[in-house]
Structure formats: structure tokens, C-alpha cells
Image: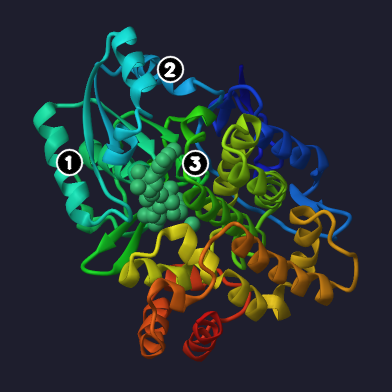
Amino acid sequence: MTLGLAVTPMFGGRAVEAGEEWALSGPALVGIIAAARVAASLRINGCNNRIVHFDPIRNYHMTSFTFQTTRSVIVEPGSSGQLGALMAGLGCTNVLLVTDSGIMGLGLATAAIDGFSDAGVNLSIFADVVADPPEEVILSAVSDAKAKNVDGVVGLGGGSSMDVAKLLSFLLGSNQALSDIYGVGMCQGERLPLALAPTTAGTGSEVTPISIVTTGASEKKGVVSPQLLPDWAVLDADLTLDLPKHITAATGIDAMVHAIEAYTSKVKKNPMSDCLAKEALRLLGTNIRTVCENKDARQARSDMLLGSMLAGMAFSNAPVAAVHALAYPLGGHFHVPHGLSNSLVLPHVMRFNIPATRDAYAELASIVFPDVEQGSAEIMAVEMTRRLAQLADDLGLETRLRDVGVSQNQIPMLAEDAMKQTRLLVNNPREMTYDAALEIYQQAH
Ligand SMILES: NC(=O)c1ccc[n+]([C@@H]2O[C@H](COP(=O)([O-])OP(=O)(O)OC[C@H]3O[C@@H](n4cnc5c(N)ncnc54)[C@H](O)[C@@H]3O)[C@@H](O)[C@H]2O)c1
Ligand SMILES: [Fe+2]
């Protein structure tokens, strides 16, 4: 099934062919449904082609927005076995699979590898990705791939493997240097064909135009360009069944943070990202405890993967903000895994944001925690932050900075580094200052 969806409110709802703007294919595509609800509820003023009304509940007014995402998606247990056929369909004959040694050791790439031989596509493997990939890993993957003359790239793994695969496909296709593409919109030229299969739920990297690289000793930089969106996102819940509890919890909270920050993103928040963020939070909130407690919860695993993808679609178009900005220095300096870094600062940044996000947090509280008591927006917003902190604790995650090796005298350095994340901080609903960051880290300590 392939669907084309015209969401071009700026141009008055012009009809488009499937694939011209963006097209998604595959079963169980809740993103389509969410987006279709948006399309159905848009009212276009035929005279001046402006949206005059959107959401009667929130009295949302907006004149224009753009939305980009991965063109094609498969959501199906076992679907990583189709990667070979999908790459053959893109004209590839010699593909590089990018992953890490943990994934290889667990046999998670086996179905994909078998699929390549079934499809008659030559496959090489680069399994040297490490968490929070440094530049050297990407450069080493590039020289490996050049020597093998590959004509397509597959990323199978967590955000780290997918981010390396995305950069690799672009650097090979364009011949630009990595050092020239940091920042927003710096990529010029085309990438090689690319498919991504996440094994965590997760970063949503399979639907984001972003790759995160650790530069130097500790700083993280982003490459943000539409060329990094892959041809295919392949969501195979079977790959996530044996994800250890700690990684399941941390990556699941990362996905929740993507949706929360997208929903409250200051600059580009829009009706489509709102729909996707809310559905993502419903799926993630409903299933995160189940997947941490029950290893065989296949449907819940699939719903988590779907939720993390929808959150990825949301935050690609309504970017994340201060939670991520304050989390990055923890990953850089203390090698705290990305999801856990976010979880550690989440309740404290949210409390700081409440003056600007009271109503939005109150709305989300009922979605993530359906049994939350209804009250004033202020009470519900505060309760949302309290419950998220409780959730992390219940799932067995560390909840204090001191638990991950941060000492009191390192807090000023963290705050200084967080303030360098201007790409993210501009999206925060409340202005973040150095003093505020210092205070938040103190509270989290
Ligand atoms: N591109 C984006 O849009 C985006 C968004 C958020 C985060 N990120 C980046 O993604 C990276 C984090 O990715 P991540 O949290 O998915 O983790 P990861 O890819 O760094 O993997 C963490 C560990 O989990 C293991 N693992 C992964 N899947 C597993 C499975 N199914 N079973 C057992 N072990 C498994 C890996 O082998 C690794 O040891 C960071 O570099 C972060 O900055 C990118
Ligand atoms: Fe994240």
C-alpha cells in the first residue's frame, strides 16, 4: 500500500501525486491516520489560501508550516529480512550494513543478512560503531565503504548506528567533507540509497534529518539536512525483544522527551507535529512499563517502536529544546547514555518551563498518565513532572546527577556547555540562561 498525502496548507491544499511531496507505505501506519485527521480538520479559506482555524479545543491559529519525513515506512515483525529486497528495489547491488558489535553478537542482524543473499545483493558489514559515535568512527566507515565501492547503505541498530549510516550514505554520495556539514542545511548534493532499521525505541533517527556526532573529547554536534532522511524506515519489533531493561527504559524516555519537547517547541510547533507527538505519547506512556517488565510483550514492543517513530516525525519538524541541550554535556563528559541523560534533567527542565507551558503540560498529562486527577493546569503540569520523575525511578533508572558520577564542582562546566547548544535552546518555550541552567543542574544533583 502506498499513500500520497497532500499537506500543503501554504498553497491552499493543492492536490499532489503519491511521492511528490511525501508518501508513506506499509501497514499499521498510525502517522498517516494522525496526519489524515489533521488534513480532515483543516479549513482552508478559499479566498486567500490561509488556514483560518485549526483546533477548536485549543483555538490554534497558524498561517503556514512545512513538514518533511521519511518517504516509506514498514511496520511489521520480521521485516528486517526484507532489507535486501528493498535495497535491490532501489537499484543497489553492493550494500554496506552499518551496525555495532553488540548487535552482531546478539544475532540481531542475521535476518537482514540472510535477506541480502536471498535478494542477490552483495553485502559488506561495518560493525565498529560505538555509542555516541565520534568523528573517527564515521571517517573510518567512509574509507571502508570507499574501498568496497558500495552503492547503498543500511543502518541497523540504535541511534548511534543509524546516525553513522545516514552520514556515511551522504558523504559517499556527495563527496562533501564531514567538517563542512555540521549545522542546519549545510549538506549539498545527494546521498546513496539508504534504509534504516532501529533496534531501540528510541531516537526516532529512522525518520529524522539529523545525525549527532561527538566532536573532540566531549562536545556533540548535529548535522541537520533533509538529505539525511532515508528512503526506508523498517520497524521490526522482533529486533527489540531482547533489549535489556535499562536500555529499554532510557531509550523509551528519550522518545517521550522528543514528543514532549516537540509539543512545546517554541519556533516550529505545528498542527501535524502536535498530532504525532500526542499519539506518540499515548503509545509510549501506555507501553513503557509493560516492555520493561515483560520481555515477551511483542505488541507492546511494536507500539513502542511506532511511538518512537511518531515522536521522531514530530521533533524533526518541531525541534527539541532545553532538555536535550542540558542532557548533551552529560553524555559528552560522563558518557551517560543519551536517554538516561535526558531522563536525569527532564523533570527539572519541565518545572523551569511551566510558566510558559502550563496548559500544554496539563493536556499531555492526561495522555501520558490517563488516571491523572483533573485539576487546574498548574496542578496537572506539576503532577506531570512529578510522575515522570517517579516513572524513571520505578523503571530502575538513576535519578540524580551524583548517581552518574557528577560532582558538585563540575556543575558550572555543564552549564557552560549547555549554553553552547544554541541550535536547541532557541526552541525552548522559556528563555534559558546560564544561571537557570546552573540552578536546574543543582536541583538534578
Ligand atoms: N538522529 C537523531 O535524530 C537522534 C535523536 C536522538 C538521539 N540520537 C543519538 O543516538 C545515539 C543514542 O542512540 P540509542 O539510545 O538508540 O543507543 P545506541 O545506538 O548508542 O546503543 C546503545 C547500546 O544499546 C545496544 N543495543 C541497541 N539495540 C539493542 C537491542 N535490540 N538489544 C540489545 N542491545 C541493543 C547497542 O549495542 C549499544 O551497546 C546518541 O548518539 C544520540 O545522540 C540521534
Ligand atoms: Fe533524544
Tag 1–tag 3 contact (CB < 8 Å)? no
Q: Secondary structure at mark 1?
A: helix
Q: Position of residue 203 (x, y in %)?
A: 48, 49
Is residue 326 or residue 401 the one in the foreground? 401
- Residue on which the image places disc 3: 207
Please indicate, yes or no, whether residue 210 appears anywhere in the rendered image.
Answer: no
- Residue on which the image places disc 2: 82
Whole-angstrom CA distance, mark 1 to mark 3, is 22 Å
**Amino acid type of disc 3?**
Val
Q: Secondary structure at mark 2?
A: helix
Is residue 199 or residue 268 the one in the foreground? 199
Mark 2 Cα shell of 10 Å, populated few (<14), some (14-19), many (≥20) = many
Q: Is residue 175 above or below residue 344?
A: above
User: Which mark sits nearer the N-terminus, 2 or 3?
Assistant: 2
Q: Is residue 192 above or below residue 246?
A: above
Tag 2–tag 1 contact (CB < 8 Å)? no
Whole-angstrom CA distance, mark 2 to mark 3, is 18 Å
- Residue on which the image places disc 1: 142
Q: How many marks?
A: 3
Q: Position of residue 110 (x, y in %)?
A: 34, 22
- Mark 1, ligand 1, within 8 Å: the answer is no
User: Which mark sits nearer the N-terminus, 2 or 1?
Assistant: 2
Q: Secondary structure at mark 3?
A: helix
Is residue 419 or residue 399 the one in the foreground? 399
